[in-house]
Amino acid sequence: MATAAFEEIAETFEFLDDWEDRYRHVIELGKAMPALEDSFKVPALKVDGCASQVWLRPVIADGVFDFQGDSDAMIVRGLIAVLHALYGGVPAGQVAAIDAAAELGRLGLNDHLSAQRSNGVRAMVARIRKTAAEA
């Protein structure tokens, strides 16, 4: 049930045999993502449970879920970009149906992230799901 943007990432990962190349690709995705304006880097948008500082700003219009995000760590910015590809543009009512763990598992991220980074990803997914459910 992944979006076309996420499928594109998954296809790219299939061509990258080495985890270091995949890691670099995630960082590049983060670099390509627009920065979140400093005015949105506020406690209400900060995600607890992440080792790095992470902010997610939901943008829901006409029942479609989207968000902007940022982090002070490049790999985490990349993970935010991956989550954006997974959830951005999905109808808010369908966000909960996306199995983030399974989809991210297709990328091999579960096996290569530290426990702290994995906890951070779960915290971001929980925030995304909660925000979409409240929309």
Image (cartoon, rainbow, N blue to C red):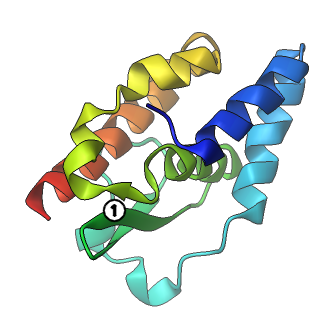
Residue 18, by quadrant, is: top right
Residue 15 point in image, percent of width and height: 89, 21
Label 1 neighbour load within 10 Å: few <14, some 14-19, many 20+: many
Task: Give the quadrant of the N terminus.
Answer: top left
Q: Kindly tell me whether residue 56 is visible in this rendering.
A: no
Q: In the displayed structure, does residue 100 sit left or right of residue 135?
A: right
Residue 12, by quadrant, is: top right
Q: Is residue 2 above or below residue 53?
A: above
Q: Kindly tell me whether residue 36 is visible in this rendering.
A: yes
Mark 1 sits on what residue? 65
Residue at figure coordinates x 70%, y 55% from the top left: 30
Residue 56 point in image, percent of width and height: 39, 63
Residue at figure coordinates x 51%, y 31% from the top left: 117
Residue at figure coordinates x 44%, y 17% from the top left: 102
Q: Amino acid at mark 1?
A: Phe
In this view, the residue in front, 33 or 133, is: 133
